[in-house]
Image (tube, rainbow, N blue to C red):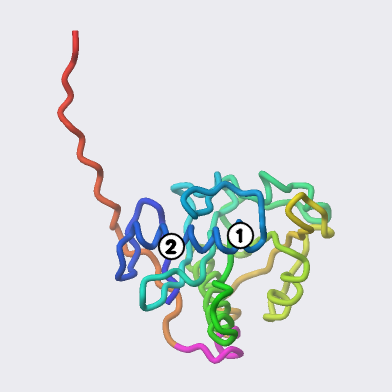
Amino acid sequence: MIYEFALAQRCAAPFPHEDIHASMHRLRHALYRQGADWSVPEHLGMEYDEFDTMTARYLVGIDETGTVRAQSRMITCDQPYMLAQLWPELAQSVPLPRSAADAEGSRTGVDVTLPVEEYRRWFFKLLIANVEWAVSNGVDRLSFVTYQRVAQKSMEGAGLSVTYYGPTMSFPDGRFIAGYFPVSTHLAHDLRRRNGIEGQVFVPLPKATPLPAVAQEDRHEVA
């Protein structure tokens, strides 16, 4: 399953909230700090950045041990998001979106230590969950920033109708390209059909399940 996760709300997965949170950031550290050698913040073997906020939503693929094997971060474009804040120059052909009808998927990745077939299945489940999350939240398009080879092989290769915001550009951490693709229920069905994936994939956040507030100690005024 791919579960929707939020920093201040319990998700439906049968594992402790804090364990899922830490496992997600450890996977990001393995993929982006260790694997890709990006210059990103890290702490205790976990990667994070300024876009990990209370309004962000995460899609986490969790195995039977409670380990996060696949994940994405979803931010609607009426909020600050990576492409607009960090790399607006990537958008030379198409204006950047600024409404909640668009969202950005970032920190999308799958555990590269998995066997090939298991990796592939997690990838397509994650892609389906991205689409189903978007549709369920009134999002029409998903934007991304990635390496050009990933955009062509993994995204166009999956059958997505990708439009690029502009050409590939060089940055300290590599050569990147930005684009978007439209989402729909039909796309989710097509991805399922072509990859032999049946049954529930995306599990949304349960209704009204905030984490308990931290109890405040009695306050004593000092003269």
Disc on the earlier residue, 1 or 2:
2
> Residue at position x 58%, y 89% from top?
195
Q: Which residue is drawn at 57% across and 46% down?
A: 41
- Residue 1 covered by magenta stretch: no
Image side of residue 3 versus residue 130, left or right = left
Give the mark count: 2
Place residue 3 in its image quadrant: bottom left
Badge 2: residue crowd in 10 Å (few <14, some 14–19, many ≥20)? some
Q: In which quarter of the image is the C terminus?
A: top left
Reply above or below: 223 against 23: above
Q: Is mark 2 on a helix, strand or loop?
A: helix
Tell me which segment is drawn in magenta.
Answer: 190-198
What is the CA distance from the residue labelled 1 to the residue labelled 2?
Answer: 15 Å
Name the kind of residue labelled 2 in the image. Answer: Ser
Q: Quadrant of the N terminus?
A: bottom left
216 with respect to 110 (left or right): left
Classify mark 1: helix, strand or loop: helix
In this view, the residue in front, 214 or 119, is 119
What residue did someone put label 2 on?
23
Q: Can residue 102 be seen in this view?
A: no
On screen, 151 above or below 85? below
The image position of residue 129, as x and y in percent, is: 51, 73
Most frequent secondary structure within the magenta stretch: helix
Amino acid on which the number 1 mark rests in the picture: Gln
Is 193 covered by the magenta stretch? yes
- Categorize mark 1 by other alpha carbons within 10 Å: few (<14), some (14-19), many (20+): some
Find residue 34 and name its label: 1
